[in-house]
């Protein structure tokens, strides 16, 4: 870093449900000088004392002690917060924790900004846009209309119990439901049953054997997920399927519900192998995200900045959602995370 630390500096934070990322940059041109990580930063689910510790952890790692007096602005994009209102509970908690973390480290930032992680992600798009639509599809799912860099309308983002349709959680839950439906006779055969069971550590002797083919009336093997009823699966007797259910349910219930999101990659892998059940799950997820975007009444050609693992370069919903949006004259502009946007907003807050 050298002489770079002798000029005005800014910090951008992307505080999400899994971790907090911090970026140190120069105030004049936004040149990145360092990056670090800390613990989870959701302003609504992480208690303020722990949130303060996680922010201080990330800040201490990225800002050398001798350069802390040079930090002129800090902006944090927090899950569970919004720039629209200081009275928002998440925003209040985030500001309290960030202010305390900065004070603890002796960082006298003249400008401290708090916004949602989605507002920060939107600002991370090329040109630091101030107007348009933002879509997040990762563990959760939410879309927002951004006006003057503030979220003015929100669609979904209602959490695992009430919403987040088309999200990683939604896909993962659908995978487990497909496994249960196959076991109890309501659903079609799918490789997801065995894959979910192995992921949960179920005993091998309760899992369906092999690639669980199903057969047509002439005895010809059908692609996975196209059979009518799991009783046609060789080696998976009713007693064995009952044992599968008996082991699977408590294994799922032992974890917080949001952990179902970890099964989303299994659905993507199964769909890549042409499992019809998995392909249906991904199609329905893309339909949900399209519905979420359309609720914002987008104008043809309007910018949609997207982020989240489901919509990245290798995201399983990138192609199907892009195809659906194309028919409405819309396209996605993907960003990896909100750190560049938080840095850009911090620079905008610092008078030149």
Image (cartoon, grey):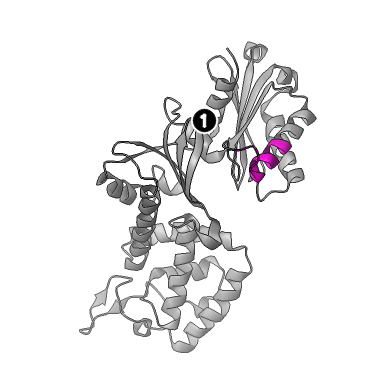
Q: Secondary structure at mark 1?
A: helix
Task: Identify the residue at horizontal 73%, vertical 48% (top origin).
Answer: 47
Q: Position of residue 37 (x, y in %)?
A: 63, 37
* Residue with the mark numbered 1: 341
Q: Total label count?
A: 1
Specify whether residue 82 is painted magenta.
Answer: no
Q: Is residue 57 visible?
A: no
Q: Is residue 110 above or below residue 271?
A: above
Residue 92 colored in magenta in the image: yes
Q: Residue at x 68, y 40 (%)?
A: 92
Residue 64's place in the image compared with 323, above or below, is above
Horizontal and vertical percent position of residue 245: 52, 79
Which image quadrant for residue 345? top right
Chain part drawn in magenta: 85-97
Overall secondary structure of the magenta section: helix
Q: Residue at x 47, y 76 (%)?
A: 180
Residue 174 appears in the figure: yes
Q: Does residue 102 appear to the left or right of 185 in the view shown?
A: right
Q: Nearer the viewer, residue 250 or 139?
A: 139
Horizontal side of residue 255 vs 188, given as left or right: right
Question: Of residues 184 and 94, which is closer to you in this image?
Answer: 94
* Position of residue 14 measured from the top left corner of the image (x, y, whole percent): 58, 37
Q: Residues within 10 Å of mark 1 (few under 14, many from 20)?
A: many
């Amino acid at each position: 870093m050298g002489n770079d630390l002798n000029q005005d500096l800014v910090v951008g934070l992307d505080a999400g449900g899994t971790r907090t990322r911090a970026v140190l940059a120069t105030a004049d041109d936004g040149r990145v000088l360092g990056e670090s990580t800390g613990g989870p930063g959701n302003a609504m689910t992480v208690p303020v004392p722990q949130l303060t510790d996680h922010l201080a952890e990330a800040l201490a790692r990225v800002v050398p002690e001798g350069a802390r007096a040079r930090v002129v602005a800090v902006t944090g994009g927090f899950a569970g917060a919004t720039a629209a209102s200081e009275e928002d509970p998440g925003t209040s908690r985030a500001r309290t924790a960030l202010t305390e973390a900065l004070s603890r480290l002796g960082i006298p930032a003249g400008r401290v900004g708090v916004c949602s992680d989605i507002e920060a992600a939107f600002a991370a798009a090329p040109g630091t846009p101030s107007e348009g639509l933002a879509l997040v599809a990762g563990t959760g799912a939410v879309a927002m209309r951004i006006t003057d860099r503030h979220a003015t309308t929100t669609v979904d983002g209602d959490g695992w119990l009430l919403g987040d349709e088309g999200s990683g959680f939604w896909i993962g839950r659908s995978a487990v439901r497909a496994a249960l439906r196959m076991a109890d006779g309501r659903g079609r055969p799918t490789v997801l049953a065995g894959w979910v069971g192995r992921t949960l550590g179920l005993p091998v002797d309760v899992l369906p054997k092999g690639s669980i083919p199903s057969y047509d009336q002439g005895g010809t093997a059908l692609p996975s997920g196209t059979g009518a009823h799991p009783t046609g699966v060789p080696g998976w007797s009713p007693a064995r399927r009952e044992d599968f259910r008996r082991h699977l349910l408590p294994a799922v219930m032992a974890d917080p519900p949001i952990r179902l999101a970890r099964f989303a990659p299994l659905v993507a892998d199964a769909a890549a192998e042409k499992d019809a059940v998995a392909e249906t799950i991904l199609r329905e997820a893309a339909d949900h995200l399209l519905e979420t975007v359309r609720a914002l009444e987008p104008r043809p050609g309007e910018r949609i900045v997207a982020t989240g693992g489901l919509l990245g370069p290798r995201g399983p919903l990138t192609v199907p959602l892009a195809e659906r949006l194309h028919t409405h004259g819309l396209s996605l502009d993907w960003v990896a995370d909100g750190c560049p946007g938080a840095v850009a907003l911090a620079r905008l807050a610092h008078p030149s």
